[in-house]
Image (cartoon, rainbow, N blue to C red):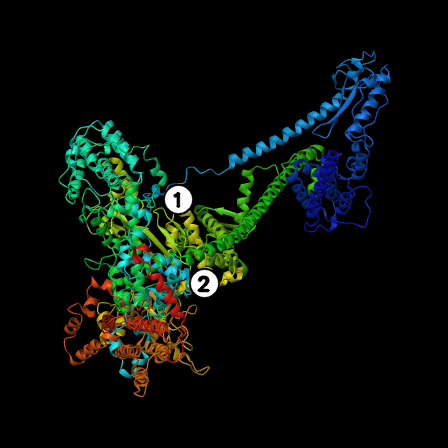
Amino acid sequence: MSDEAAETVEKEARRKKHKKRMNKLLVRAWNLPDSTPFQDSSHPSGDEARYLTVVGQNLDKGIYEHGRSGWEIFAKDMGLVYNWHISRKGKHTSIAKIHLDAVVGFFAKIDPSLGNVAVNSMPGDTSSDSTSTKNSFTAKKRKNNGNDSPDTTPKKKANVGNNGHLTLSQREKRAMELLAAYLEERGGERAQSENFRCKVVRRPGGRFDSIFFSAENKRFKSMADVARFLNLVDAPTRGQRDTKAPSRPRKVTEKKKLKRELDKLMKLKVKASKALEDHNNEEFVDEFPASDDSLWADGSNASKAHKAGKIVPQSDIESFPGIPTHCIPDLLMVWDFLCTFGRTLSLQPIELDDFANALSFCPSADLQNSQPVEEQPQLPPQLHIPVYLSECHIALLRLLVKDPTSDLWWWSVLETPEMVEQEDEYLNQMDKKRKAAAAVVKIDMEALLSVEEDPAVTRKWLQALEDVRTRKPDNSGPIKSAVKSAVAVTTNQHVKVYLKKAMRTWRAKSAGLVKRAVVWLIGRVREARPDLWGRTVSEDEIAEQKKLVAIEAALEMDNIVEDVDVDDGDLNLEGDSDEESDSDEDEGSDNEDEYADQTDTPASPSKQACSITLKENDEIKPVTTFVPMKPVPSVVDLLLPPAKPMVPSDLVHALTWPPVIGATSIRIFQWYKRRRNEIDDSIREFRQLRPMSVAERRRREVSASSRLLSECGDPVDGNSNHVESAINHLSDGKCYLDLNAIQRLSILRLLIEAAYDTHHVQLSIEDNFKARMNAVKALDAEERRAKKAAREELASIESAARDRLATEAREAFIEKKRQEIVEDIKDTQEYSVEFIESLNDDDIIDLDDDTKAEYEALPTRESFNKGEVNAVVKQIQEETAFGVERLTVLPLKEIEQRDEDYLKSLQEELESYGEADSRETSAKIDRLRQRITKFTDQMQTIPLDRNSAIEILKDAIQDGTVRTLRTAIKGAKLAGLSGEDEDNGGVWALDLIRDASLELKEAEARKRVTEAQKDLVAKRNKCFTRTEPLGRDRYQSSFLHFDHDKSSRVWAERDLILSNEDSIPSKEAVLLKSIQSASIGAQDKSEDFVNLDDRNKPCGKYFLSFAGQEYHHSGNLLTLARHHWSCYTTDRSLRVIVKNLDGKCAKENDLKEALKETLETLALSATGGDTIPSHATLAEDEETEAAASIGKTDFFSSGDEAAFCAEKENVPKEDASLLKEISSAIGCRIRLRRIPDPDRAPDVAEYSMAIVTGWKMANAPQTDTLEGEATEVALATQATLPVWRLGLDDGGEIDISASEAVEGVVRATKWSTGHPGYVEHDAPFLSYRNSLGRFCGRAVEAPSSLTPQAFAKQLIKREQDLYMPLKNRTFENNWGGKAGARQVWVSSLKECGHTFEAVREGLLTLENAFFDLTGRLGSVEEKVVDELATESNGGAQDASAAQSNGGALSGKDLLYDHTSRFDIELESLGSDVKGIWNSSDAREIFQEIIGVSKTVSVLALGLDLICRNAQAYINQTKSSVVQPINTDQAAGAYVGRRRAAKRPGAYADFF
């Protein structure tokens, strides 16, 4: 039952699916244009489906629900709707034909045969009567013809009556009843069927088979087989037919079968023929896409220029003033990071030019000295650090300090004896494993290696000793067994003696020295004999290696002091065996690596048989740790707290950021040194090389800066470079403005390297990556929609092409038949000419049966091959792009011939008039002569115009932008390369105009897509990940456009061409560089990559060359390679780049398309995002461009010397020297100054660079006069002034006066050369304010956030916070009492707080006051008084301090001694806090630091140190008034961090 139900459900589902599909097709036909006449009618049509409404009713009735036959009937009815209207020849005939073709296309997509059914359905055909057909089909059943004989086998019927709902058991019961009746009919008895049983089986197709079985389980397939088994007489034999039964019409069956086969073959033939035609008409590429290398020397101008080391076109911007060209990559990277992660950093982006100006900003010393005393409290912004630099440094510092990754590299500057003692405990396991085993037993290694021994024997005893490596030192039994086995195997007496000496120190559960000796021997022998392990090594190399190992071992032997009383005789190696020491491994040891601990600390003589001491030898001693040498604590380190600063706090503040940045940078720098050391050691370990020595490690650490920051790593002097010098400068508390641009850039680069590793940045990248994926999906969906629209447009064009081909074939046929009829009339005179002319196309087709048959045999729209269709499609696209119905494409020669024929026709027409016999004829002759004269004059100049227009067309096609193509097409039309075609009513044009029009259409489509995707692209770009290049050219040059840069800029990064010649290349050959000048940074250590024995072999050399290709494609560099960076800002430069790109190269083709899109985007942004204008707007634009091009010709490219020199006389004397050698402004660089908003921001200007392209004399501007007062005399006497035209670097042109030109030249010269004292006071970067973070305070206070006046405010505020708690803890108050010292101090700061000396003295005064309030130093108070008295008397302070310390170093000496600086502690730590200082030396050091400081930042750090110590005193003492209350939240943070800092091994632990 379940099978039958499933079958029914499946059939019903198929019916619904077919009905739904038919309904969709009917709806599409209903929605065709102008389909109202075919939808419904008030006139009934009987049984015929003449309207779509009838077809819909039949569909609802279920008439079409019978598989393929239903589809055929549905197609007939749909075709009948339109054929009925066509046969009537009414007013809807033409529309019916169009709709019929569309419906046929709908059916053809399902099955081509259905389309033929729809076309061939004719009204009045009874075979197509839908209703009768459906009724007859539904009523049709298989009937018995009455001639069935009882001898024939009964036929199985699938569904008779209600059989479709019978179960299998019911079917079996019914089959047995039929068997009984059948046996009775054949002459048997019904009872015979009882000896049989039936089984009904359902087949996969839904058919049920009945199988019978006898009592002996014999199987019978039918009832006839059962009758034959029972020997019934009337049973037919197998394969025998009943002669009485009528046979099925065999001919009809075979005919239907052949027809089906023929239909299948025809379909296959059509498919195969189309596939063959498509294959033959495909445009195959004659050759594979050219590789990049093959185009390097293709003979083009671009390849020749690249080979000569030139760049085409020349860059508009190569560098910025103060920024060297080799630092451009770092500049772009730093700026792009700060702009890209602006939201993560809470930093407002800034333009690239302003960022470069801020980096190279240096205040004018003359301006600073010229400020009067009364104006110094209001210093101009050009004397301070630019606000953007302060904001970006504070933002990076906050990001790093808040992130947990900074815990890896921020170590404490404090070291105590406990730290040193327990440092080994905190070393990681990797460092322990890397500790090399030291020699503990003396041996003559040279003699040991000189003994000739079988290599197999040597390998055998070495393998026996290898088991010692895995044993613990307390597992003595296996160690002794391994040594005993090696002694028994080896034939080298030196080895035996060495092992026996080592075994003298063996003790039960204590075999550490034995293990060390064995491991040392294994390592040395393996190092001396590399040939033992399958490596191919020459004899000379083995001898050299043995010699080297012997020398190193001899140096180690000198460090060993061994007892003289040593017996080399045989030792009793019997003792604890493996069985006796089985319990050793079970018991184990708490120390998992006692051997590692014993490596550095040799056993004492009292506990060991040998007394060993190790001497330091840096050239021999291998490194044991990644941690680099600890730097000397700087002045800033002494003022900082022992732990990492917290945010928010006064340490990460606008007043303190320069020195804190220095302290942070040195920690980051040490961290990257450590990582570099780890990489070096891991590479050497992977290559199975010896660990490098301590001396080699120190030498590599010296060049670490050039290995980490190569671009900014140029050395400043012999010992330091920009990175280290900048770090040391800031760490010593010096002024930030004293750094040059490269040093500032290197500090930012170092901070950003650490910022990339922070969790905040990684999370930001992950979140933006997810958002970017969604944005990319939306953009992809829009691109797919655009592609789908393009495909639909192409499909419609292809359909129109097929219609055109069919129409042309039909028209050609009709015309041919019409001519044949005309020819027949001449012979037969059967029809008159008037009758023939009155015949329409349908009459000619129906003229006779042959003509009708030929017409029906014409090719249909689906029968044309792809080649024919593509040709017409191309023609339609050309006509559409040109905006005409007919287009004739002509070459230039035919156009010239057309002009000659036209001139000749005019002359012939003139000759035809002869002599003028009337006034009208004379007028015509005059007009003809004028036309001939005008046309002849045009023929003289038109070749040059045409050649120029053709060149412009070629350039425009290569450029591919809308604006350029429109201008070129307009110029070509004006040059007579296109015109109206009188023959066909269309237009003729040059083939290049045709190509340009097609390119223009593609460009407009690309522009529409770009405009439609503008918002999606902006949304995607906001979800930043990294800046991807636009593409690469054949020379692997990258082209980039940064999102936050000016929209017209495209940056290019090109590889340099290495030249072996020492000759100096020309200035134009900027890409030709020697290997030395192309290298940057430290060289790779080749000994780390290739084994010693493979370095001089071809394989080693090839590997090094292959590894060098990472830096340069030639593989000749072992360092980072410099790159040439250039920037293109003008449309002219970008168009030249596009022109030089070759489409044969796949990379360049993609880059070309990307640059075209960039140009279209730039044009779109320049026009404000307008869509493609109408034809009227285009005409106006073209007229404007034509007028502009005419205006350009008014400017001259030379001859301005007199006007320029005349204006030079008005230049101030100090600037006259800059213009001394400049006689003409043409070609000079100009720096323009413009004020965008004079009303709201008159002090903020914009500066831009330009170049002078031409000049002219123009009328002076008119002053405001009354209307009508300007007379012709006034205009004639109007004065003329020189005007220069500039081409802006950012695109566009502008005209300036003579004074502006001279000032611009002077300004550009000073700006580009870094002229001393030149400062642009109103530059945009000086007015920058960070609206996102405001780390420097309010917008008004931001420029002065790092001034003495700001520090004076901070000083007063912090004193007010701590005065009351300190006052409550003392009984003697000489600070805020009746003496009034506190009030005087506050007043002096308010009056003189704008000077540095005043705030420094104020800080020292505050320190003395807090020192008194906290009880001074207790027992040493008199000593401090003596020291102060000595200072006041001008005595020798150092001598008194030395005497007071009992001859020890004073605090000042401790500060300037690098060794003792490690022991300085200015922080009040612990629970025993007696005052703000823990010793008199600490106070003396603090006073020395503050006394010699020159910056406000150091004073701010000193103030914070005093406040921290005062807060520690407050927290540890009781108030004399109330119980102590911790009100400062920062104090708790410092206490917690202080506990963390007290953990031993602070410096080594963080590494």
Q: Quadrant of residue 728?
A: bottom left
Give the image location of residue 174, x and y in percent: 82, 26
Residue 1290 visible in the current orientation: no
Q: Secondary structure at mark 1?
A: loop
Residue 453 is left or right of residue 387, and the answer is: left
Q: Is residue 1449 left or right of residue 259?
A: left
Q: Could you tell me residue 1250's position as x and y percent? A: 34, 65
Which quadrant holds the C terminus?
bottom left
Q: Residue at x 45, y 83 (%)?
A: 1266
Q: Residues within 10 Å of mark 1 (few under 14, many from 20)?
A: some
Quadrant assignment for the N terminus: top right
Is residue 1328 depicted above or below 440 in this figure?
below
Residue 531: % across, % down? 23, 32
The residue pinned by badge 1 equals 1145
Circle 2 residue: 1166
Q: Is residue 1139 left or right of residue 1440?
A: right
**Above or below, comparing residue 478 to residue 910 in the picture:** above
Q: CA distance from mark 1 to mark 2?
A: 31 Å
**Which one is nearer the viewer's eye here, 1458 or 1270?**
1458
Q: Quadrant of residue 521?
A: top left
Q: Position of residue 542 (x, y in %)?
A: 19, 33
Please, is residue 1424 above or below residue 1383 in the view? above
Residue placed furthest toward the bottom: 1378
For the residue pair 508 and 115, the one nearer the viewer reads as: 508
Give amino acid for label 2. Answer: Ala
How many residues crowd around disc 2 within 10 Å: few (fewer than 14), some, or many (20 or more)?
few
Q: For mark 2, give the secondary structure.
A: helix
* Residue type, label 1: Cys
- Kindly indicate the quadrant of the structure image that contains residue 1412: bottom left
